[in-house]
Amino acid sequence: MILEVAILEVIPQQTLSFEKDFEKASAIISSMKGYHGHQLQRCLEVSNRYLLLVNWEELTDHTIGFRQSAAYLDWKALLHQYYDPFPTVEHYEMVYSGSITNLSSGSANFNPGSLNEQSDDAEQSRSAAV
């Protein structure tokens, strides 16, 4: 699983229009092969800054499958007009995951996660290549 991360700086006077158009654009991205979900979060300190998180099965599902598709042109037409400056997009792989459970019962228990074994394998491969 790959996490796409983009910090979106939206033209301040256009945030409401951006959010409405993002809702429309969500239908585009969610129909793509390898898509597993996304979130758009608004920054509390800077009201025109957003964090876009998209989960993809593989990197190429985003970089080739989505970005080189006709659907991407529709996404671009809806959203790219709002960015100033144009965002940098980066991709991440899971190294560690943990969670808090039992919030509904009033008691929070930390559920320690584990290191992603694929990360260890990837690191060993990178080390061997050097």
Image (cartoon, rainbow, N blue to C red):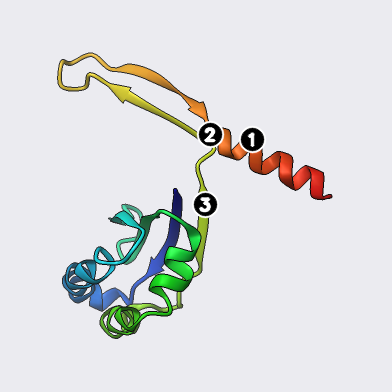
Q: Position of residue 113 (x, y in %)?
A: 45, 25
Query: Which residue is more in the foreground, 50 or 92?
Result: 92
Q: Residues within 10 Å of mark 3 (few under 14, many from 20)?
A: few
Q: Secondary structure at mark 3?
A: strand
Asked which quadrant contains residue 20, the reply is bottom left
Q: Position of residue 33 (x, y in %)?
A: 33, 64
**Sequence-wise, which precedes: disc 1 or disc 3?**
3
Q: Residue at x 32, y 24 (%)?
A: 100
The amino acid pointed to by label 2 is Asn
Residue 34 on image: x %, y %: 36, 59
Q: Amino acid at mark 1?
A: Asp
Between circles 2 and 3, the one closer to the viewer is 2
Could you tell me how far apart the alpha carbons at marks 1 and 3 are, in whole angstroms? Answer: 15 Å
Left or right: where does residue 34 sit relative to residue 31? right
Earlier residue among tags 2 and 3: 3
As drawn, the residue found furthest toward the right would be: 130
Residue identifier under label 2: 116
Q: Secondary structure at mark 2?
A: loop
Give the mark toward the camera: 1 or 3: 1
Residue 116 drawn above or below residue 46: above
Camera-side residue: 78 or 15? 78
Mark 2–mark 3 Cα distance, whole angstroms, equals: 12 Å
Instruction: State the image quarter where residue 39 is shown.
Output: bottom left
Residue that appears at 37% across and 18% down: 110
Q: Which residue is mark 3?
A: 92
Amino acid type, label 3: Tyr
Tell whether label 2 touches label 1 (CB within 8 Å). Answer: yes
Rounded to the nearest whole Å, what is the CA distance between mark 1 and mark 2?
7 Å
Q: Which residue is mark 1?
A: 120
**Front residue (pair 5, 9):** 5
Question: What residue sits 29% from the left and 86% below the top?
Answer: 77
Determine whether the residue tagged by mark 1 lies in a helix, strand or loop.
helix
